[in-house]
Amino acid sequence: MPDTVNHVPYDAHNSEIIMNIRNITKKFPVAGGKFLTACDNVSINVRKAETIAIVGESGCGKTTLLKAVMNIHAPTSGEIVFHGKDITKLTGEEKRQNYRHIQMVFQDPTAAFNPKMKVKNIICEPLLNFNLIKKSEIDEKARELLEMVELPGDFADRYPNNMSGGQRQRVAIARALALQPEIIACDEATSALDVSVQDTVIKLLVKLQQERGITYLFICHDLALVSMFAQRVAVMYLGNVMEKIDGDKLDNARHPYTRALLKAVFPVATKDNFTIETLQGDIPSPLDMPAGCPFQDRCYKCADKCRTEKPVLQELDYNHYVACHYPVTDEELCR
Ligand SMILES: Nc1ncnc2c1ncn2[C@@H]1O[C@H](COP(=O)(O)OP(=O)(O)O)[C@@H](O)[C@H]1O
Ligand code: SF4
Ligand SMILES: [Mg+2]
């Protein structure tokens, strides 16, 4: 495990809970009258000024969960309570106003930006949409927001195509910051960047969090990356949260799936005759969910009970929850 860097000094465990994601299930209708369960009964409490990383292989339901939080699509069941209101039920102007408080940054901002718009218009568009600035104020506001993301003010007159990937992602962050949201949802926001650029963008996000108390929901498939700055980590598999753990305690993860993900990125020390298998094969189809544990076909610890009884999240330790009948034990783990 590398040294943790830039852990926010904010006491993430004692800050106010600003959002309760409660029992969110999202089923998509697919061909043949079947349903695909993209999120299955997901519950996460979101605190002010913390980063919650949501990790897992492609297709495990991370984006679907964020889209429910962003109110882009309604969940099949469950609720998302934000400042006392279930935002999944909002409609009309109330729903529109809610977008001010929760903004999103995507993996590829180029797709979200109109290439014919100057950076200043891209950044200030949300402010104009909510009538928060006049057109005459665009230049000044754009410069202010560009400075926040450590880009020169004269980038305001550039077009998105005349920038590097890292610079474009900073513009996307500036646009997300414009409305002073409480939560920014980042969907693989740094995944397409070179490692060194990724590092500077993460440092910028952490700095902005410290200055402004922003909460991040940070979707990522890179456990090593999130261990460096996320206070909380939720590990998803086939739409289910398998483990919730503090980011700086990831080396104590006890779900066999989390351990397999860790093994893929860190050299994990084990006792002489004990090996943790790395992940074999692809994530199974969410259309053919087995009875019992979703991870059973790839789990080296799978036993009879795992094939019949679905494990639910249980508190193993303070702030540490695992959905597994046979979590990895101290004996199995050499720490
Ligand atoms: N609009 C949709 N219709 C049908 N299936 C979908 C839709 N969106 C996502 N899915 C399916 O839901 C599952 C989870 O997808 P997604 O949330 O995008 O995963 P991730 O972001 O973790 O890669 C996948 O099997 C995906 O194919
Ligand atoms: S419940 Fe069983 S199959 Fe599932 S992760 Fe735990 S040991 Fe493995
Ligand atoms: Mg996704």
Image: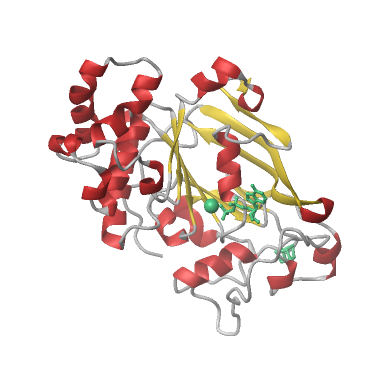
Find residue 219 and report its horizontal and vertical position in percent.
Answer: 49, 49
Residue 16: x and y in percent read 50, 27
Q: Residue at x 62, y 56 (%)?
A: 60
Q: Is residue 179 visible?
A: no
112 or 17: nearer the viewer: 112
* Count of all numbered marks drawn on residues in the image: 0
Q: Is residue 221 above or below residue 116?
A: below
**Figure quadrant of residue 255:** bottom right
Q: Is residue 75 visible?
A: yes
Does residue 316 appear left or right of residue 102 in this picture?
A: right
Residue 184 image point, x, y percent: 43, 36
**54 w.r.t. 113: above or below:** below
Q: Is residue 29 left or right of residue 280?
A: right
Pick whichever, 176 or 250, lies toward us: 176
Where in the figure is residue 179, as x and y percent of width and height?
A: 37, 25
Identify the residue at horizontal 43%, vertical 47% (top origin). 230
Q: Is residue 289 left or right of residue 50?
A: right
Determine whether, in the image, residue 60 is placed left or right of residue 151.
right
Please say if 198 is above or below 44.
Answer: below
Towards the viewer: 34 or 39: 34
Residue drawn where x is 43% and y is 28% of the image: 182
Q: Residue furthest bottom?
A: 273
User: Who is closer to the viewer here, 140 or 225?
Assistant: 140
- Picture colour scheme: secondary structure
Quadrant of the frame with the N terminus: bottom left
Q: Toward which corner of the image does residue 74 lie, by quadrant?
A: top right
